[in-house]
């Protein structure tokens, strides 16, 4: 069985290593983060602090959007959008990686501590009982400080998070 993580779609564009893991992995991605890709693509605001990195990531975002818009992938995504919390069939992202879109809903259960996308990540993680994978240090801090009952990994610890022992010892 592949390792599973809840994460945002933009992570696939920013961190190429997520698409080439050493062992099978499934990323569960809230649909709203797919929609966020369009906003990032169309925005004049930089995604990355260095111009070359920003240009590279925006290219990867466009490629990811195009991939999700391919007829088979689009059909898989659209099927899950009719029912709250429904999941798409797996969409392959390489030999070892696949993405599953979840039609998550922000129900404001975490108030103003977390924004709507963060809330959807938390709720999806709780619902699916899989850890969150993020590069947002502030989000990790707020999860820990708030005692939110999810496991979370920094993207820099991706290889560690993929290790089997990590999951055996988790609560």
Image (spheres, grey):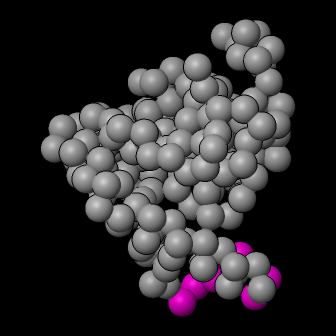
The quadrant in which residue 58 appears is: bottom right
| Front one among 21 and 111 | 21
Does the magenta run of residues contain 47? yes
Please report the residue visible at 64 percent of the width from the left and 82 percent of the height from the top: 46
Please report the residue visible at 80 percent of the width from the left and 24 percent of the height from the top: 163
Q: Which residues, given as a range, are shown in magenta? A: 44-51
| Residue 164 place in picture, x, y as percent | 76, 18
Q: Is residue 76 above or below residue 14?
A: above
| Residue 127 place in picture, x, y as percent | 42, 24
Does the magenta run of residues contain 15? no
Q: Is residue 63 left or right of residue 153?
A: left
For this orientation, the residue located farthest to the front is 95
| Residue 61 place in picture, x, y as percent | 55, 71
Q: Is residue 65 left or right of residue 11?
A: left
Determine if residue 24 is in view: yes
Determine if residue 107 is in view: no
Q: Quadrant of the N terminus?
A: top right
For the stretch drawn in magenta, what is the main secondary structure?
loop
For this orientation, the residue located farthest to the left is 82
State the count of labels. Answer: 0
| Front one among 57 and 121 | 57
Please report the residue visible at 39 percent of the width from the left and 44 percent of the height from the top: 101
The quadrant in which residue 162 appears is: top right
Q: Is residue 124 left or right of residue 169?
A: left
Please report the residue visible at 33 percent of the width from the left and 40 percent of the height from the top: 88
Q: Quadrant of the C terminus?
A: top right
| Residue 78 place in picture, x, y as percent | 23, 52
């Amino acid at each position: 069985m592949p390792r599973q993580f809840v994460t945002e779609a933009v992570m696939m564009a920013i961190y190429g290593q997520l698409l080439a893991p050493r062992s099978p992995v499934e990323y569960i991605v809230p649909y709203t983060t797919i929609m966020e890709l369009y906003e990032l693509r169309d925005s004049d605001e930089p995604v990355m602090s260095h111009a070359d990195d920003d240009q590279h990531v925006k290219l990867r975002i466009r490629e990811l959007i195009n991939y999700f818009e391919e007829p088979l992938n689009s059909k898989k995504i659209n099927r899950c959008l009719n029912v709250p919390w429904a999941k798409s069939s797996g969409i392959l992202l390489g030999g070892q990686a696949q993405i599953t879109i979840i039609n998550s809903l922000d129900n404001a259960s975490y108030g103003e501590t977390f924004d709507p996308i963060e809330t959807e990540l938390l709720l999806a993680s709780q619902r699916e009982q899989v850890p969150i994978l993020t590069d947002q240090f502030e989000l990790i801090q707020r999860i820990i400080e708030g005692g939110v009952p999810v496991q979370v990994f920094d993207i820099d610890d991706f290889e560690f998070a993929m290790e089997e022992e990590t999951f055996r010892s988790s609560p």
